[in-house]
Amino acid sequence: MTQLTLVIGNKNYSSWSLRAWLAIKQSGLEFEEVCIPLYISDYSTKVRQYSPSGKVPVLLHDTQTIWDSLAICEYLAEAFPHQHLWPEDKTARVFARCISAEMHAGFQKLRQNMPMNCRVKYPGKGLALGVQKDIDRITSIWQESRQKFGAGGDMLFGDFTIADAFFAPVVLRFVAYDVQLDAVSRDYVEAVLALPTMQEWIQAAKNETEVISEYEF
Ligand SMILES: N[C@@H](CCC(=O)N[C@@H](CS)C(=O)NCC(=O)O)C(=O)O
């Protein structure tokens, strides 16, 4: 098989990188990882060697360069259909695509006020105006997915899918900021955290030494 290379940012801070990394890791595909720490002095030069947008993540495969986390996940699902990265059932797949797109394009208040950070605990911080509305919408998505499609396992659609990769950074945000959750959402958070791949990411994030002060309180 042609080599897959995934270019990512710091594991502690790069929420977009986590989505692509988790999708590829959960699919069991072999890949090479290139890490470019965000905002170091030559970040732009380094990242532009791989990424036309100047952002991570970027996937390199065969002659293709795929940037943007959603495009990467769609590419993986298409290139490796036997990995079942989207749900098999059409109705579930439609729902999974909608909620992943909603996550991709939305929840700005949550993103701005509760930056992903695996190393710290900031209970009660980040609850600026509009953040609770984002949290409520996310937990209602999780409840609906689990109730309608989740019977076969602990993930949103039973087995792991791209939708779980998309919400994984939110799981880490909810843990870091100790966000109060309903029982279904709490169970989902625990299930995502229990994935060995998530534990691997978190441990690697804790081992990193770079500090980006604008992402710290
Ligand atoms: N929509 C893009 C967003 C990627 C993105 O914003 N990545 C951040 C790191 S988490 C980045 O590269 N920031 C560097 C910059 O904006 O210069 C995706 O889904 O991949």
Image (spheres, rainbow, N blue to C red):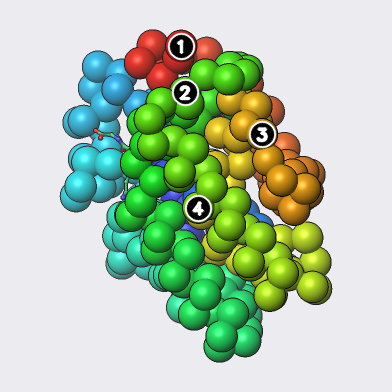
Identity of the amino acid at label 1?
Phe
In terms of depth relative to the viewer, which is nearer, 203 or 176? 176
Look at the numbered discs 2 and 3 and tell me whether their residues touch, using CB distance below 8 Å: no
How far apart, in angstroms, are the residues tagged by discs 4 and 1?
25 Å
Q: Is tag 2's residue or tag 4's residue first in the polypeptide sequence?
A: 2
Relative to 149, residue 99 above or below? above
Q: Is tag 1's residue or tag 3's residue first in the polypeptide sequence?
A: 3
How far apart, in angstroms, are the residues tagged by discs 2 and 4?
17 Å
Left or right, residue 113 beside residue 169: left
Displayed-image quarter of ligand 1: top left
Look at the numbered discs 1 and 2 and tell me whether their residues touch, using CB distance below 8 Å: yes
Identity of the amino acid at label 3?
Gln
Q: Which mark is residue 217?
A: 1
Which residue does the image show at 31% across and 66% down from the upper left?
64
Look at the numbered discs 4 and 3 and tell me whether their residues touch, using CB distance below 8 Å: no
Identity of the amino acid at label 2?
Gly
Write down the residue under mark 3.
Answer: 180
Left or right, residue 106 beside residue 120: left
Q: Is tag 1's residue or tag 2's residue first in the polypeptide sequence?
A: 2
Identity of the amino acid at label 4?
Arg
Write down the residue under mark 4.
Answer: 137
Which residue does the image show at 48% across and 64% down from the upper left?
99
Q: Is tag 4's residue or tag 3's residue first in the polypeptide sequence?
A: 4
In terms of depth relative to the viewer, which is nearer, 28 or 192? 192
Write down the residue under mark 2.
Answer: 126
How far apart, in angstroms, are the residues tagged by discs 2 and 3?
13 Å
Q: Residues within 10 Å of mark 2 (few under 14, many from 20)?
A: many
